[in-house]
Amino acid sequence: MSWPERIVIEPGVLAGKPVVRGTRLAVEFILELLAAGQSEAAILANYPGLTRDDILACLAYASYLAHEYKAYPVPV
């Protein structure tokens, strides 16, 4: 499973933020829940339209972005 199958960006949905396909749940929201310590089971219980693969796709998308981001130190 690759994240592009589950994560979409549509200008008319949440102002173009990446969301889980078929929902209005932003990737950043799912990542915030995980970062705050919510378990996968708790997230799935609170958002029945979400699947484990959707959560994994959010993590894969975040990993992709982290790999794509290039930061170069500025000489002082």
Image (cartoon, helix red, strand yellow):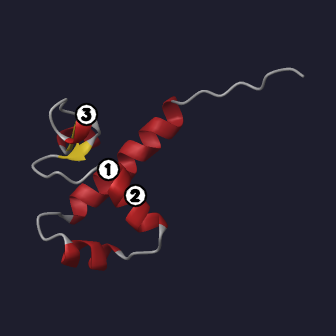
The mark nearer the N terminus, 2 or 3, is 3
Give the x, y percent position of residue 38.
Answer: 39, 75
Q: Dot 2, crowdedness within 10 Å: few (<14), some or many (≥20)?
A: some
For label 1, the residue is: 27
Residue under the point 29% across and 38% down: 17
Give the x, y percent position of residue 9.
Answer: 22, 34
What mark, if any, has residue 31 been given in the picture? Answer: 2
Mark 2: secondary structure = helix
Give the x, y percent position of residue 57.
Answer: 29, 50
Q: Quadrant of the C terminus?
A: top right
Residue under the point 36% across and 43% down: 61
Q: Are marks 2 and 3 in contact (CB under 8 Å)?
A: no
Q: CA distance from mark 1 to mark 3?
A: 11 Å
Q: Is label 2 or label 3 in front?
A: 3
Q: Is residue 67 visible?
A: yes
Mark 1: secondary structure = helix
Three-letter code, disc 3: Gly
Image vertical order of residue 75 relative to residue 59, above or below: above
Mark 3: secondary structure = helix
Three-letter code, disc 1: Val
Q: Splitting the image into 4 quarters, where does residue 6 fall?
A: top left
Q: Are marks 2 and 1 in contact (CB under 8 Å)?
A: yes
Image vertical order of residue 65 relative to residue 74, above or below: below
Q: Dot 1, crowdedness within 10 Å: few (<14), some or many (≥20)?
A: many
For label 3, the residue is: 16
Q: Is residue 2 visible?
A: no
Residue under the point 86% across and 20% down: 75
Q: Residue furthest top?
A: 75
Identify which residue, 28 or 40, lies in the foreground.
Answer: 28
